Amino acid sequence: MVKIKYPEYTFKMKEAQGKELIWDDIRKKWVRLTPEEWVRQNFIQYLAQVHGYPAALMAVEKEIWLHDVKKRCDIVVYCQGAPWMIVECKEMEVPLDDLVLRQILTYNMSVPVPYLTITNGLYAAVFSRQGGALVPLEALPLWPESVT
């Protein structure tokens, strides 16, 4: 499990119709600030600023199909045009348990990636897909420098 230390970042925020909104740099729009959205926006900055993952290669709330059911991945990071990592964000009170892991593994059936990450904003559990096995990692994978 990785303890997350977020970088300093000044988010654009506003209130509209009695709801707090935050600017999503990836989607280029204002979104409602929910506890899960707080985790998602901060984790995006963590990936970009701390780990050097290019923000331009991230998709937020990426629609996928599981059989004939539409779902959304919180964050998909691409590398060389292919999905490289899926991140599932939960609000801080949600434990990173088998239920959350099963959710991201279900998404991985539709969008196969080498890396899976689940986070509740405080911690992240990171896994590597190696053959048919799911291997827990001690840290997020390094961004492949050869593709930047």
Image (cartoon, rainbow, N blue to C red):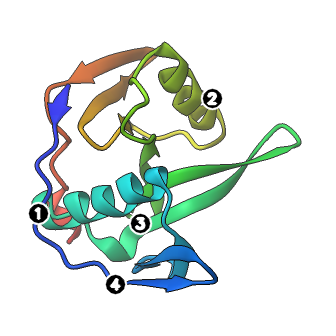
In the depicted structure, whether residue 39 falls above or below residue 31: above
* Residue type marked 2: Thr
| Identity of the residue drawn at 14% across and 56% down | 6
| Image coords of residue 17 (percent x, y) | 64, 83
**In front: label 3 or label 4:** 4
What residue appears at the point 22 percent right and 66 percent down from the top-left corner?
48
Find the distance from the CA under tag 2 to the CA under tag 1.
Answer: 31 Å
User: Are circles 2 and 1 on residues that touch, CB within 8 Å?
Assistant: no
For image coordinates 89% across by 42% down, the residue present is 68
Circle on res. 12: 4
Front-most of residues 94 and 97: 94
Mark 4 falls on what kind of element?
loop
Picture coordinates of residue 26, whole percent (x, y): 43, 76
Nearer-N-terminus badge (4/2) = 4
Q: Nearer the viewer, mark 2 or mark 1?
A: 1
Look at discs 4 and 2 and give the one toward the viewer: 4
Q: Name which residue type carries label 3.
A: Met
> Which residue corresponds to mark 2?
106
**Can you identify the residue that label 3 sits on?**
58
Relative image position of residue 22 (x, y in whole percent): 43, 76
Quick one: which residue is furthest to the right in this view? 68
User: Which of the image's four quarters has the N terminus?
Assistant: top left
Give the Cα separation between the discs numbered 3 and 4: 19 Å
Taking the image as shown, residue 110 lies to the left or right of residue 15, namely: right
Give the Cα separation between the discs numbered 2 and 3: 20 Å
* Residue tagged 1: 7
* Pointer 3 or 4: first along the chain: 4
Mark 2 / mark 1, whichever is N-terminal: 1
Label drawn at residue 99? none
- Cα distance in 3D space between marks 4 and 1: 15 Å
